[in-house]
Image (cartoon, coloured by chain):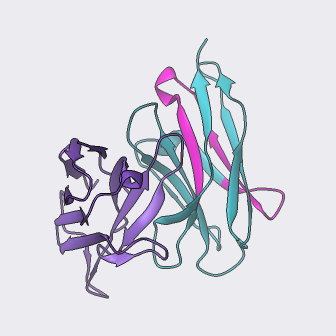
Amino acid sequence: DIVMTQSPDSLAVSLGERATINCKSSQSVLYSSNNKNSLAWYQQKPGQPPKLLIYWASTRESGVPDRISGSGSGTDFTLTISSLQAEDVAVYYCQQYYSTPYTFGQGTKLEIK
Amino acid sequence: QITLKESGPTLVKPTQTLTLTCTFSGFSLSTSGVGVGWIRQPPGEALEWLALIFWDDDKRYSPSLKNRLTITKGTSKNQVVLTVTNMDPVDTATYYCAHRTSIGNLFDYWGQGTLVTVSP
């Protein structure tokens, strides 16, 4: 199984400041046939299902604000919120869809400082 | 628009079999590339992918639970059923069904989830 490890477990950032969440996979998730990384990011607010934010490590899902971005390749990935808004308070998960089982990270809880 | 909704018992006893139904609309599980997956989340814990069924009836299972899971298309063409045998208190979780995206085995539309508690 590919193990997904996120850091930090929790993060407190001031409104308007940058938030950075890291995700490391235990093996590369770079899909050679299209040279894309099979890595997604989700946002989950309390009492709600996860919401897909980013796929192929850096492609924003339709409707996701451009202050949210993804980067990275191979085994190391980052989700960045450039200017934290109150509505960004949530738990964020990365997921690899390179191979079964399609594993998730343990989650990073993002709060307002 | 695409919607999904999970249904099934909220309480099961240890050793019992859990049967959950996902009823969806806005897409067809007969269309090439389409899939429906199940993911669960114990209270306060992370997401765990369980199973995925594709338009062509191909199926994928989490190896850690494979012997206990069965995913099938329902008798109605807009349903997917997940069964989990030999339930244990550690299986207490919110169970979600979700629509597989067209580009890979990730999920772009999710149901609201159903909390299943395993208790004597």
Q: Which residue does the image show at 53% across and 40% down from the upper left?
A: A47
> Residue A79: percent from the left, percent from the top?
25, 63
Residue at the right extreme of this rendering: B76
Q: Colour of chain B?
A: cyan
Question: In which quadrant of the rendered image does the C terminus of chain A lie?
Answer: top left
- Foreground pick, A30 / B112: B112
Q: Is residue A17 magenta?
A: no
Q: Which residue does the image show at 25% across and 70% down from the upper left?
A: A29
Segment colored magenta: B72-98
> Residue B33: percent from the left, percent from the top?
58, 79
Which chain is assigned purple?
A: A
Residue B42 higher or lower than B29, as above or below: above
> Residue A59: percent from the left, percent from the top?
35, 78
- Left or right of B94 in this view: A30: left
All told, the count of numbered labels is 0
Residue B5 higher or lower than B93, as above or below: below
- Foreground pick, B104 / A58: A58
